[in-house]
Image: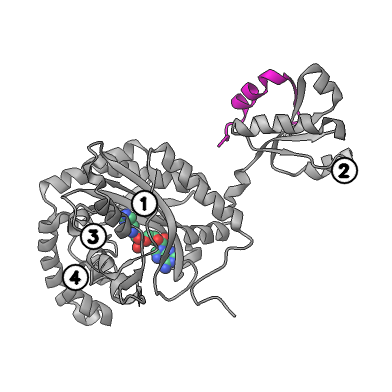
């Protein structure tokens, strides 16, 4: 029996997966986002109303089924609609302490043509923040995503940003765009000929057949913005510049989901190794989605990363983020008499947040030391009866071989000062 097309098993690279998840959780916690998890299937209507009938996701890619109670259900093709549904259903908007900030991690399902970085079951990590419309919040979110990618070891990160205006200005822009596209309809792919009439914005998002020049020469949505959106977009850029975030304005960026208003953005890893699948994440503001799904008028903003895509690109670029996982202290006992002492120190250090390993066998000290030579270790401590009797620990820097004799009571303080990557 084989796995279904477009799915994969996580086997040998399981620790990379866990690491990416963990780093995302702890970064989001630093930004004061709370964990939220919603069901993997929801009513089909949620996604139709939330994401938009005219999108590729809804018209072609959902896994729909009817359960034994004849309910129409859909495996979530993305995580935002479910979180907004939960926000409304649980009346989280009544809490006046805004913004309400959430992060999530989990699988999503789209019936797409599988290729490198594109699967039918894939994992997303995302954040969503509700209740405040502010370029400051958009900047915080864009920066969080950027810092995540930086932390994983990516260097050529590009962030595309755009502003697609509000409902009124966007409706006017769609008319202008439709008029332009109509004069070029013979150059559009078959799908886009239909998209053009349903929602001409979707033509800008078509990544396949259309000649680039048609899209490039299309009127810019930025020319249609009103004063408020213009100022909002300007403010966003001022914040991003202050933060040194490498962004470019892409006036043709509209994103493939219908719920966006004003800010939209995408994270791209600038590499030719994975073709079109180098967009590792995207998001934007969705100020009408909460009310569309039955809640009060509440602005929202967020993004999602494609985690399997990130892993694929890390592999292609030979970046191994788990290499950073240095063992802070490796405790080596010289004989069995020191076993319990070893465990006690290890336990105290682990409970203080340090990554600690101990030797489980002390039969051949020099062989063990040889094996440890190339291991990712910060400090090595060899413990014998002498160390126990004097209440002292000898730490050896595994890279420089510099040695320190530390009083047992000062060990945590010393490591606090010297192990910067404590997490
Ligand atoms: P999205 O652009 O549809 O946005 O998906 C976000 C990311 O998920 C993409 O940039 C890509 O890395 C990954 N992804 C999408 N489809 C696949 C696939 N078939 N295989 C592997 N990875 C994939 C959203 O989903 C929005 N909910 C983002 C958002 C959150 N907007 C506001 N809040």
Q: Are marks 1 and 4 in contact (CB under 8 Å)?
A: no
Local crowd at mark 3 within 10 Å, few (<14), some, or many (≥20)?
some
Estimate the spatial distance between the alpha carbons at disc 2 and disc 1, rounded to whole Å.
49 Å
| Residue 420 forms part of the magenta stretch | yes
Q: Which residues fall within the magenta stretch?
A: 400-423
At a point 23% along the width and 45% down the height, the residue shown is 93
Q: Position of residue 401 (x, y in %)?
A: 76, 30
Estimate the spatial distance between the alpha carbons at disc 1 and disc 4, rounded to whole Å.
25 Å
Q: Which residue is mark 2?
A: 367
- Asked whether the viewer can see residue 316, the reply is yes
Estimate the spatial distance between the alpha carbons at disc 4 and disc 2, rounded to whole Å.
69 Å
Residue farthest to the front?
69
Give the label on residue 259, or none: 3
First in residue order: circle 4 vs circle 2: 4
First in residue order: circle 2 vs circle 1: 1
Give the label on residue 199, or none: 4
Position of residue 397 relative to residue 359, above or below, is: above
Position of residue 20 relative to residue 110, above or below, is: above
Q: Which residue is mark 1?
A: 159
Q: Are marks 2 and 3 in contact (CB under 8 Å)?
A: no
Estimate the spatial distance between the alpha carbons at disc 2 and disc 3, rounded to whole Å.
61 Å
Q: SS of the residue at dot 3?
A: loop
Q: SS of the residue at dot 4?
A: loop
Q: Horizontal placement of 60 versus 94: left or right?
A: right
Estimate the spatial distance between the alpha carbons at disc 3 and disc 1, rounded to whole Å.
20 Å
């Amino acid at each position: 029996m084989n796995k279904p097309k477009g799915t994969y098993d996580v086997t040998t690279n399981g620790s990379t997966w866990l690491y990416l998840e963990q780093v995302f959780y702890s970064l989001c916690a630093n930004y004061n986002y709370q964990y939220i998890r919603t069901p993997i299937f929801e009513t089909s209507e949620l996604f139709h109303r939330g994401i938009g009938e005219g999108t590729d996701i809804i018209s072609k890619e959902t896994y729909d089924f009817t359960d034994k109670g004849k309910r129409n259900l859909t495996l979530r093709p993305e995580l935002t609609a479910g979180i907004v549904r939960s926000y409304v259903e649980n009346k989280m908007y009544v809490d006046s302490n805004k913004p309400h900030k959430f992060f999530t991690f989990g699988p999503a399902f789209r019936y797409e043509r599988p290729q490198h970085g594109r699967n039918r079951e894939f994992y997303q990590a995302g954040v969503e923040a509700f209740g405040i419309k502010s370029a400051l919040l958009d900047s915080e979110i864009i920066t969080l995503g950027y810092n995540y990618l930086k932390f994983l070891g990516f260097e050529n990160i590009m962030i595309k940003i755009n502003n697609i205006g509000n409902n009124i200005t966007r409706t006017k822009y769609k008319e202008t765009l439709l008029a332009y596209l109509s004069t070029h309809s013979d150059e559009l792919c078959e799908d886009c000929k239909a998209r053009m009439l349903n929602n001409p914005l979707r033509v800008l998002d078509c990544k396949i057949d259309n000649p680039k020049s048609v899209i490039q020469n299309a009127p810019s949505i930025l020319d249609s913005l009103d004063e408020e959106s213009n100022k909002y977009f300007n403010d966003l850029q001022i914040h991003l510049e202050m933060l040194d975030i490498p962004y470019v304005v892409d006036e043709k960026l509209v994103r493939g989901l219908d719920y966006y208003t004003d800010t939209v953005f995408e994270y791209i890893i600038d590499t030719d190794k994975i073709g079109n699948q180098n967009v590792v994440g995207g998001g934007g503001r969705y100020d009408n989605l909460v009310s569309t799904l039955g809640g009060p008028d509440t602005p929202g903003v967020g993004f999602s990363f494609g985690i399997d895509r990130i892993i694929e690109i890390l592999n292609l670029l030979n970046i191994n983020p788990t290499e950073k996982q240095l063992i802070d202290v490796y405790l080596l006992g010289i004989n069995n008499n020191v076993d319990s002492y070893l465990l006690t120190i290890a336990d105290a250090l682990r409970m203080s947040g340090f990554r600690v390993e101990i030797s489980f066998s002390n039969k051949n000290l020099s062989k063990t030391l040889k094996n440890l030579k190339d291991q990712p270790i910060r400090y090595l401590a060899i413990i014998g009866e002498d160390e126990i009797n004097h209440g002292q620990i000898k730490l050896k820097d595994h890279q420089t071989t510099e040695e320190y004799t530390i009083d047992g009571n000062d060990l945590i303080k010393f490591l606090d000062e010297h192990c910067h990557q404590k997490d």
